Amino acid sequence: MENNIKKFVIIGPESTGKSTLSQNLATHFKTVWVKEYAREYLEKNGVNYTFENLYEIATGQLVGEDVVTIKLQKTNLQTNILIIDTDMYVMKVWSEFVFNKCDNRILNTITQRKYDGYILCNTDVPWVKDNLREYPDLETREKLFHYYKEELTEQKTPWIIISGDYEERTKQAIKFIEGLM
């Protein structure tokens, strides 16, 4: 059944509403979603991470995606849509931004995992402070946004940029997903 599952990934800089959007989309499509593992990892291990820790975080993200995919396959939901908050593009951009390099295993995974659509969250919502976020300034957030956009333009999976308030973003993402179904 995995081949029947349509996977949509939410990406973008921190505090652009990825988790909120993921939850809203899962509710709308009556499905499950994959949470961002980095948040769980940093809450448990602290925010002083190393380059090597990023591969651990990437691995945790992939395991989470696989576990939720299996859960969706075994559940009698009326949907075949899976919403994923963050993927290896996020790990790549973050790694290159912070450490100026990326683990080849992350890069290889990008070429191996296939998705049905990417939703890139713009920086036009207010930054919300929390203990895990590192870049509150709009200039850095916009720079990161452009790195994500560049990644998406260099691959073949359909993608969209969503903007506006959380309700507008949700509507745009629903329309995008429905258009690909």
Image: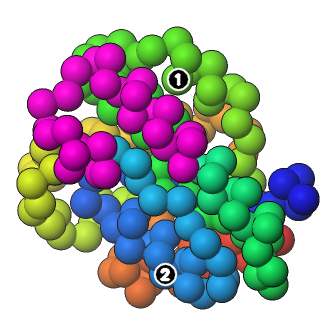
Specify the amino acid type for callout 2.
Asn
Front one among 118 and 78 = 78
Asked if residue 37 is positioned above or below residue 174 in the image, the reply reads above
**Mark 1 sits on what residue?**
106
Q: Left or right: 160 with respect to 94?
A: right
Specify the amino acid type for callout 1.
Ile
Q: Give the quadrant of residue 94.
A: top left
Q: How far apart are labels 1 and 2 at the CA level?
A: 28 Å
Magenta residues (range): 39-64
**Image quadrant containing the C terminus:** bottom right
Instruction: Residue 18: give x, y in percent of width and height.
Output: 40, 63
> Magenta stretch mostly in which secondary structure?
helix
Front one among 72 and 93 = 72
State the residue at coordinates (39%, 35%).
57
- Residue 160 visible? The answer is no
* Mark 1 touches mark 2? (CB < 8 Å): no
**Label whose residue precedes the other's in the sequence (1 or 2):** 2
Does dot 2 land on a helix, a strand or a loop? helix
- Residue 6 visible? The answer is yes
Does dot 1 land on a helix, a strand or a loop? helix
**Mark 2 sits on what residue?**
24
Instruction: Residue 66: give x, y in percent of width and height.
Output: 65, 48
Q: Is residue 52 magenta?
A: yes
Front one among 48 and 12 = 48
